[in-house]
Image: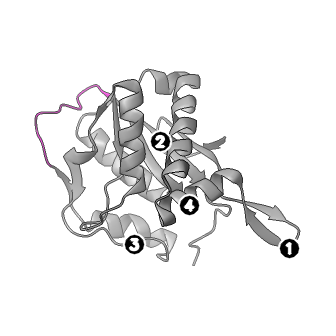
Amino acid sequence: MVFLRDCLNSSLALGYNFISEGDSLSRTEIGELEHNAKHNEDMAAINKITELMTNTIRDFCPYTKADLICSVPTHQGKDFHLPAILAQNISEQFRMLNITENFSFSADKPSLKNTKIEEKWDALAGVEFLTQDNTVTLQGKSIILVDDKYQSGVTLQFVASRLLEKGASKVFGLCAVKTWRDDDNSS
């Protein structure tokens, strides 16, 4: 497990996606699962990640007290969004209200993969964060926010900031993997 330092009340990743082996990197077990789940839509990998996330929530006290679960919003028009599937699966395990469908970006969220870290927040801020359903109140609620990969953490922190603005009291990040490097998008 990787404890992540950011602006959320707590953020965890199940592990790193790669491990150093001499001069090369190879995928870790969780890295392989995340890769297969995301790129191959592998149900066995999705189910295993769900199981590991569920166990993490059960074992880590702040997460056990969360009221709601939500994934980071998807790109518009994207049929498969691993974080949303993981949030739905976890929701079913804990009978916790999944509010993923209540939030979206007003336009297609830009890909941040190759964006310089100092430009990521502004790229997200340029796309409005929308509330789809006003019947769910976030006032005073604690939320587990799910993502598949924590690279710089900007997406998770941006979405968490918007959930807090809408009244949430706490946001706990839960990611399948943390990227190996912390300087992925340095200038």
Numbered disc in front, either 1 or 4: 4
Name the image quarter holding the C terminus.
bottom right
How crowded is the residue under tag 1: few (<14 C-alpha within 10 Å), some, or many (20+)? few
In terms of secondary structure, where does tag 4 sit?
helix
How far is mark 2 from mark 4, CA to CA?
Answer: 22 Å
Marks 3 and 1, the one that precedes in the sequence: 1
Report which residue position mark 2 lands on.
173
Bounds of the magenta span?
Answer: 132-141
Q: Amino acid at mark 4?
A: Asn
Residue 140 x %, y %: 28, 25
- Dividing the picture into quadrants, the one containing residue 155 is bottom left
The foreground one among 160 and 14 is 14
Q: Amino acid at mark 2?
A: Gly
Residue 171 x %, y %: 40, 36
Residue drawn at point x = 31 percent, y = 39 percent: 164
Residue drawn at point x = 41 percent, y = 28 percent: 93
Residue drawn at point x = 48 percent, y = 72 percent: 113
In the displayed structure, 16 sits above or below 22; it is above
Residue 149 x %, y %: 52, 56
How far is mark 1 from mark 4, CA to CA?
Answer: 24 Å
Report which residue position mark 4 lands on.
36
Numbered disc in front, either 1 or 2: 1
How far is mark 3 from mark 1, CA to CA?
Answer: 29 Å
Report which residue position mark 3 lands on.
111
Q: Amino acid at mark 1?
A: Asp
Residue drawn at point x = 67 percent, y = 64 percent: 181
Report which residue position mark 1 lands on.
23
In terms of secondary structure, where does tag 2 sit?
strand
Name the image quarter holding the N terminus.
top right
